[in-house]
Image (tube, rainbow, N blue to C red):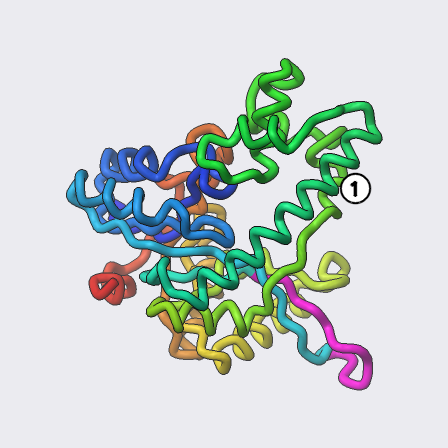
């Protein structure tokens, strides 16, 4: 079955390596008919993406991906403290000019700058001195994030490419650097913002949901936590689940589809493509299983 829809793409307006236009060009070359730009916590590239889609004759949908958290009682210790879950919420068909969305994203942008300043300080303590101006100069879209650090390190000759820089545990993949995070938005609020901006809200890559101690849980416990979380988000207004994902196994896809069917949620398909050469598995053309087109018929209304 030839794929025609990919609803999870990232450009260099977040942590991708390519322009929105280049993403559309690659999608068109693969025969895609509908694609969505879902940059992390931002919509700056949406207009460029939609315009590129019009040029190529494919539907280019404005979207977003919120990094979020959700707190709820621990199902295995109801009298203990609440458990915090970390989940990504995708939004499709949003109005990037919505005032409430813009206000929330401005706050997130300020938090990201604070995170970047802390990273600059960490690198300075470890003998690598850099400035925010240098990072901005290595950010083709003006978005300063971890890729900006990686590009600067490549420019300084420390690495051969961005992908190598991001993977090196000496610096950008160092646990101490990875622990420097900004505050995340509450998942219910993310859903509210997406729907308020005229969009549909989906759980991204459900098997990447995290919570304290998830690494030590059995598969059955992790499954129970995942299902409980998504059920709670459905009650908050969640519209669907990203059941078809680039690195899902057929068994994982089937499990996600079963949950979507049980909760009467919509189904989406997304690769999480961040640009050529960035993530070998998560690319537009790589899926272990493909959906019945009827499951994605809802996208015609985007």
Q: Is residue 273 magenta?
A: no
- In this orientation, which residue lies closer to the viewer: 77 or 153? 153
Q: Give the residue at x 32% y 61%.
A: 93
Against 38, is 123 above or below? above
Mark 1 Cα shell of 10 Å, populated few (<14), some (14-19), many (≥20): few
Residue sitting farthest toward the top: 157
Q: Relative to the observer, which residue lies in front, 209 or 128? A: 128
Q: Residue 148 at what x, y percent from top left?
A: 57, 32
From the viewer's perspective, tell me whether residue 271 is left or right of residue 221: left
**Would residue 57 be found to the left or right of residue 36 on screen?**
left
Q: Which quadrant: the C terminus?
A: bottom left
User: Which of the 4 quarters of the picture holds residue 76?
Assistant: bottom right
Q: Mark 1 points at which residue?
A: 176
Query: Residue 116: which quarter of the image?
Result: top right
Viewer-side residue, 219 vs 202? 202
Please tell me which residue is depicted at 47% across the width and 28% down the height of the picture. Answer: 277
The answer to whether residue 80 is magenta is yes
Q: Give the range drawn in magenta.
A: 76-87
Regarding residue 187, the answer to whether it shows in the image is yes
**Is 267 drawn above or below residue 76 in the view shown?**
above
Q: Residue 193 appears in which quarter of the rendering?
A: bottom left
Q: Where is residue 77 in the image (x, y as percent from the top left)?
A: 78, 80
Residue 208: percent from left, percent from top? 58, 56
């Amino acid at each position: 079955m030839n794929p025609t829809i990919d609803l999870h793409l990232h450009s260099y307006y977040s942590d991708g390596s390519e322009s929105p236009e280049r993403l559309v060009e690659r999608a068109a070359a693969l025969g895609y008919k509908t694609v969505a730009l879902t940059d992390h916590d931002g919509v700056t590239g949406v207009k460029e993406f939609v315009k590129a889609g019009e040029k190529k004759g494919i539907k280019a949908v404005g979207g977003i991906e919120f990094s979020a958290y959700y707190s709820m009682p621990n199902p295995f210790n109801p009298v203990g403290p609440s458990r915090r879950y970390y989940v990504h919420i995708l939004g499709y068909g949003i109005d990037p000019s919505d005032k409430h969305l813009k206000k929330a994203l401005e706050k997130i942008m300020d938090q990201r700058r604070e995170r970047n300043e802390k990273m600059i300080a960490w690198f300075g303590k470890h003998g690598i001195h850099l400035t925010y101006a240098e990072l901005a100069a290595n950010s083709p879209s003006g978005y300063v994030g971890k890729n900006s650090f990686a590009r600067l390190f490549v420019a300084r000759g420390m690495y051969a490419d961005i992908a190598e820089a991001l993977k090196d545990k000496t610096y950008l993949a160092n646990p101490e650097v990875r622990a420097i995070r900004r505050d995340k938005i509450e998942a219910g609020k993310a859903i509210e913002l997406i729907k308020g901006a005229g969009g549909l809200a989906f759980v991204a890559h459900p098997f990447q949901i995290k919570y304290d101690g998830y690494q030590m849980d059995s598969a059955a416990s992790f499954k129970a936590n995942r299902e409980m979380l998504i059920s709670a988000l459905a009650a908050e207004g969640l519209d669907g689940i990203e059941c078809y994902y680039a690195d899902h196994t057929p068994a994982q896809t089937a499990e996600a589809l079963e949950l979507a069917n049980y909760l009467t949620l919509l189904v989406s398909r997304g690769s999480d493509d961040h640009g050529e050469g960035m993530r070998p598995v998560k690319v537009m053309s790589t899926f272990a299983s493909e959906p019945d087109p009827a499951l994605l018929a809802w996208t015609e209304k985007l």
